[in-house]
Amino acid sequence: TAGITQAPTSQILAAGRSMTLRCTQDMRHNAMYWYRQDLGLGLRLIHYSNTAGTTGKGEVPDGYSVSRANTDDFPLTLASAVPSQTSVYFCASRDPLGEQFFGPGTRLTVL
Amino acid sequence: SQKIEQNSEALNIQEGKTATLTCNYTNYSPAYLQWYRQDPGRGPVFLLLIRENEKEKRKERLKVTFDTTLKQSLFHITASQPADSATYLCALQYMDSSYKLIFGSGTRLLVRP
C-alpha cells in the first residue's frame, strides 16, 4: 500500500500567490495532521482533523486553512503565501493505537 | 507551554556500541511518549510507543524507558550499525481532543563503521 502520498514534492512560489498542498491516505485512518518542519524547531502542528467533516487548529495555524471532505484527502491551502512559510510540510495520519504515519513531505520555497 | 529538550549536538559512536539518546520535558507528563526515526529528505517513521504507566519497552535492538518523576525518556540502540545513522525524534502525546504529537527537535546519531 502507498500509505500517505503528498504532492507536489517541491514548489517555488511567489509571495502573495495561493497554493494547495495535497495529501491522500489509503489506510482509512480517521485522524490526519499537517506539520511544518523548520531547522532547529522540529515539527510543529498546523491543523488537524479527527474525522471527515471536522478540523481543528494546531500550534501554528495562521495563514493556513484545511478541509476534510472525505476520509482519504486532507488538503492544506496557503491563501496568500509569505516568505516565512518557506518550510518542509508533512502530512500524517494516526492509527487507533496512536502511531502516526507520515508522507514524504513537500518542500516549499516562498520568494 | 510544554517544552521538549533533545540534545541538539550529534551523537557520534562506534559500530557495535550502545547509543543512548535523551528526551526531557517540562510540565505535566503525557499519556504516551513516542520515538520516531527520520532520514534526510524523508518523513518520520514510527519506532516505539510507551505509556505513562510503563517503565520500559523493547523492540529488537531498541529499548525505551519512561520516568515520569524525572520527566525523561531514554532511547537505546544496542549493537549499533552504520544503518542506524539518522535523526531520532521524541514526541509527547496527550489525551486531548486532537491526540496531537508535540515533537522535540531531534538528535542526530552517527554510527561509525
Image (spheres, coloured by chain):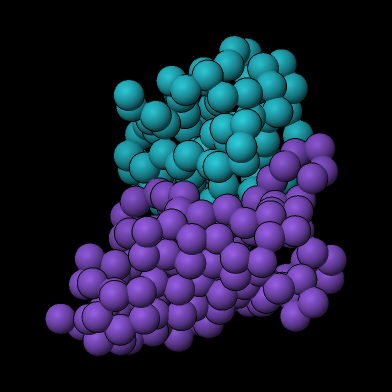
Chain colours: A cyan, B purple
Residue at point 56%, 75% (across, down): B74
Front-lying residue, A95 or B76: B76
Quarter of the image for residue A2 reads top left
Front-lying residue, A14 or B77: B77
A65 relative to A90 in the view: left or right: right
Residue at point 47%, 22% (across, down): A27
Residue A25 in the image: x percent, y percent? Answer: 46, 24
Residue A86 visible within the image:
no
Residue B14 in the image: x percent, y percent? Answer: 25, 86
**Picture quarter with the N terminus of chain A:** top left
A31 relative to B89 in the view: left or right: right
Residue at the farthest top position: A70
Quarter of the image for residue B79 reads bottom left
Front-lying residue, B87 or B63: B63
Residue at point 71%, 16% (across, down): A53
Residue B12 visible within the image:
yes
Quarter of the image for residue A71 reads top right
Residue at point 62%, 56% (across, down): B50
A79 relative to B86 in the view: left or right: right
